[in-house]
Amino acid sequence: MQRKPFFIVDVFAEKKYAGNQLAVVKKAGALPENEMQRIAREINFPETTFILSGEQRDGEFDSQRVRTLLSSHLGRSGDS
C-alpha cells in the first residue's frame, strides 16, 4: 500500500473546527479511480478531493473530486 499525504480542512467556516470537513489527498495522479473511491469511503466525509498533479495550470491544480454519500444522505437507516 502506498502512502499519500493528505490534509483535513474546514470549508465554509470562519474559524477552526466549524463548517464542513473536506479531505485533500496530494500526489494522487497514479491512483486508479476505484482506489480513490475506496479512500474516500474510508475517510467517510461528504467529499474528498484528490490533487492529481503538483503543477499548476492557469492558476489551478489538476484535481478530481470524489463524493461519498453516507447512508443517512440516501434516506436509509440500518440494513435494507
Image (spheres, rainbow, N blue to C red):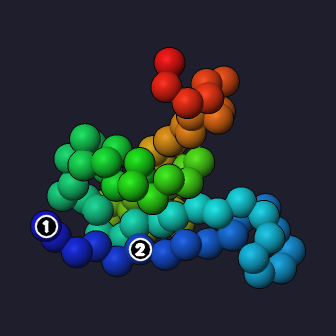
For the image shown, how many numbered marks are present on the structure? 2
Q: CA distance from mark 2 to mark 1?
A: 15 Å
Which residue is tagged 2? Answer: 6
Query: Residue 68's x, y, as percent?
Result: 50, 41
Residue appearing at x 61%, y 72% in the figure: 9
- Residues 27 and 76: in front is 76
Query: Residue 5's x, y, as percent?
Result: 34, 77
Residue appearing at x 55%, y 72% in the figure: 8
Q: Looking at this rendering, what residue extends furthest in the left direction?
A: 1
Q: Is residue 25 left or right of residue 35?
A: right
Which residue is tagged 1? Answer: 1
Q: Is residue 72 above or below residue 57?
A: above
Q: Is residue 9 above or below residue 66?
A: below
Q: Residues within 10 Å of mark 2 (few under 14, many from 20)?
A: some
Q: Amino acid at mark 2?
A: Phe
Q: Amino acid at mark 1?
A: Met
Q: Is residue 3 above or below residue 24?
A: below
State yes or no: discs 2 and 1 in contact (Cβ < 8 Å).
no
